[in-house]
Image (cartoon, rainbow, N blue to C red):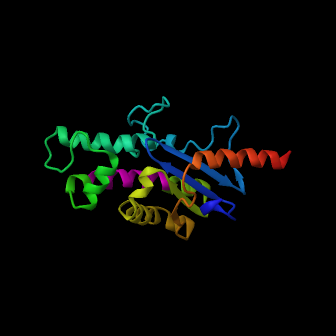
Amino acid sequence: WGAARGLQHALMLTLGTGVGGGILAGGQILRGATGVAGHLGHYTIDADGPLCICGNRGCLETYFSSKAIESEARALVHRGVPTALTLESTCADVFAAAANGDEPAREVIAMAVRRLAGAVAGLFLIFDPEVLILGGQIAGAGLILTAPLREEVAKRTRLMLRRDVPIVASQVAGQTGIIGAAALVQTRLDAA
């Protein structure tokens, strides 16, 4: 369905409070030996990084999630950095301030996007997807997220992949979790 329709190899990242994901490999959803494959937010990007809710350290979602971005914004405010951000600023507020030229907010977003790009580049070299689909509330930030992400990922992967992997927005609107669950049930019914 959606942006992966007709493809055999695709990655999906849902960017929100955490980072979710999914892997389509050979036309099949990759579930792994125990069913936990696809927890892409728990891909380690810094072995000595902050403790994650999963018990690991330095997971992608400890650096790129609405919680992580809001935490960085609060740290700026606590340090007294001149910014339009406040202790109550949401992730959407940080993206909006960055888009409006607030330099500290721009730096928070740039750092988060660089970390996301590093993780995405690693995933591209592991899975060699036809496309990366972005969903979730943060994906709605638009070009302030996707333009630097595409540029950084291309720089990191073009030599090995010899192509730029498209990074696109999710095309399934609304309750995507419910739609995905229904699709899994339908797939199992079709197989029976």
Residue 109 highlighted magenta (yes or no): yes
Where on the picture, by quarter, is residue 156? Answer: bottom left
Q: Residue furthest top?
A: 55
Magenta span: predominant SS is helix
Q: Which of 114 and 7 is in front in this view?
A: 7
Left or right: residue 12 compared with residue 151: right
Number of callouts: 0
Residue shown at 56%/41% (left/top)? 39
Where on the picture, by quarter, is residue 129? Answer: bottom right
Magenta residue span = 107-120
Q: Nearer the viewer, residue 139 or 58?
A: 139
Left or right: residue 157 compared with residue 71: right
Vertical relation: 64 (above or below) 51: below
Image quarter where the N terminus lies is bottom right
Q: Residue furthest right?
A: 192
Picture coordinates of residue 90, whole percent (x, y): 31, 45
Residue shown at 62%/61% (left/top)? 2
Image quarter where the C terminus lies is top right
Vertical relation: 152 (above or below) 58: below
Vertical relation: 23 (above or below) 33: below
Residue 118 highlighted magenta (yes or no): yes
Q: Nearer the viewer, residue 53 or 123?
A: 53
Q: Nearer the viewer, residue 155 or 89?
A: 89
Left or right: residue 155 compared with residue 102: right
Where on the picture, by quarter, is residue 4? Answer: bottom right
Picture coordinates of residue 47, whole percent (x, y): 43, 38
Picture coordinates of residue 17, whole percent (x, y): 43, 41
Left or right: residue 79 compared with residue 119: left
Q: Residue furthest front?
A: 174
Picture coordinates of residue 136, whole percent (x, y): 48, 50
